[in-house]
Image: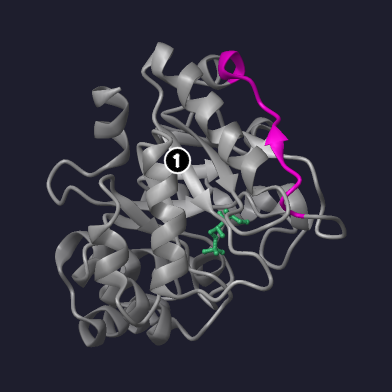
Amino acid sequence: MKNRLARIFNQKSGKTVMLAVDHGYFQGPTTGLKKPRETIMPLLPHSDCLFVTRGILRNCVSPATSTPIFLRVSGGPSVLGELSNEDITTSMKEALRLNAVGVGTSIFVGEKNEDRTISNLGRLVNEAEEYGMPVLAITAVGKEMARDARYLGLACRIAAEMGAHIVKTYYCAEDFDKVVEGCPVPIVIAGGKKISERDALQMAFNAISKGAAGVDMGRNIFQSENSVAMIQAVRAVVHDNYGVDEAFELFNKLKEKKVVDSVVE
Ligand code: R5P
């Protein structure tokens, strides 16, 4: 368990930049991930780990990569159905066979199937503990839920109480530090919908300043006009204490160098 966690969190900064590319598990070929291999491969060297489903891992990621793999192991509904209707879809045996450093499942607090998804998490932790496998709980926000500290704090705390080793949630402008305080395990933030690069860097900066242990960011990296430059700017904020202006300047400099988003074998 400790060795796997050490491969997720950078030894110097104690933080992580996870690249989330699991969106297709309910959204299908979403913008930026229509050709997953072309999106993922140039970003891999800059990611502390890759959050991905086994299908995309098998088909679109070179097994020669040294970037740790964090597996999304839940699923079931599509974007057309009831999103909270999830079960565990990938076995622990498969996660071990794929040499994963962790497994992730969503909990839908306040949604139709909240009890089932929280039980899914508990069962996953039971099994994961047997093999020293960290579990990431993703606090999915339902359509009706306000992304405020009260709700996110509730969902994060429940995830930690069930035994999650890491919790992924959204950043909220007000009282995010209280969400962190109420959760005894590291919190990483999802980026959410694409916003401007500067705003995304600001969000990452705010989250880190208020106690987040890193990001598990997807769209704000892979939908960026220059995804390789963007992930490096996010890294500068998370690992190197860059301010927002400095990080945005870095993004622009890297972008001007026209970092080629070519496929790296
Ligand atoms: C949902 O599809 C997944 O849990 C994503 O991994 C998560 O939302 C992070 O991706 P993004 O930064 O695009 O929100």
Question: Which residue is rendered at x = 57% and y = 55% of the image?
Answer: 109
Tell me which residue sits at (61%, 18%) in the image. Answer: 94
Does residue 29 appear in this view? yes
In the depicted structure, whether residue 143 falls above or below residue 24: below
The foreground one among 219 and 231 is 219
Tell whether 167 sits left or right of 84: left
Query: Measured from the top left, where is residue 196 in percent x and y?
Result: 48, 86
Q: Please name the residue shown 67% across and 57% down the image.
A: 111
Coloured how?
one colour
Quarter occupied by the C terminus: top right
- Whether the magenta-drawn stretch holds residue 187 is answered as no
Q: Is residue 56 visible?
A: no
In the rendered view, does 240 fall on the left or right side of 256? Answer: left
Residue type at numbered disc 1: Leu
- Looking at the picture, how far across and down is residue 187, in whole percent? 33, 54
77 vs 188: above or below: above
Q: Position of residue 69 (x, y in %)?
A: 47, 34
Residue to which mark 1 is pinned? 136
Label 1 SS: strand
